[in-house]
Image (spheres, rainbow, N blue to C red):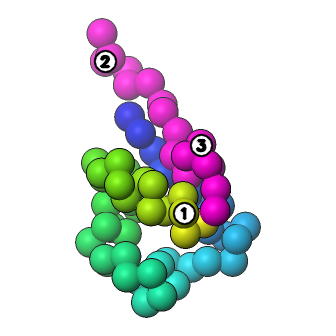
């Protein structure tokens, strides 16, 4: 499973809120909901978030092995 908990921590460290992403960077509310719920998002979205936050991929997401991976 890919988790986006690190995204919200990085946003806090950078002083960027979800409201900022929605209003200043035109990130749709539906995408913010997908991130909050660890749903699938596109790679271009990950790239865009890294550009907005000026961070690396590891700063916004992490892989947690599924219990039933095999």
Say whether disc 2 or disc 3 marks the residue closer to the N-terminus.
3
Dot 2 surroundings within 10 Å: few (below 14), some, or many (20 or more)? Answer: few
Q: Which residue is mark 1?
A: 51
Q: Quadrant of the N terminus?
A: top left
Q: Which residue is mark 2?
A: 68
Residue 15 drawn in magenta: no
Residue at point 61% right, 77% down?
16
Point out the stretch of residues depicted in magenta. 54-70
Q: Indicate left or right for 47 with 5 as reference.
A: left
Question: Residue 2 has which mark?
Answer: none
Q: Indicate left or right for 68 with 55 as reference.
A: left
Question: Residue 58 has which mark?
Answer: 3
The answer to whether the residue labelled 2 contacts the one labelled 3, judged by CB atoms less than 8 Å apart, is no
Residue at point 41% right, 39% down?
2
Q: Taking 68 as reference, is 46 above or below it?
A: below
2 or 3: mark nearer the eye: 3
């Amino acid at each position: 499973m890919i988790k986006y908990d690190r995204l919200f921590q990085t946003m806090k460290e950078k002083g960027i809120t979800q409201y900022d992403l929605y209003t200043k960077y035109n990130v749709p509310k539906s995408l913010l909901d997908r991130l909050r719920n660890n749903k699938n998002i596109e790679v271009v979205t990950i790239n865009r978030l890294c550009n907005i936050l000026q961070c690396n991929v590891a700063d916004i997401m992490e892989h947690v092995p599924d219990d039933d991976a095999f």
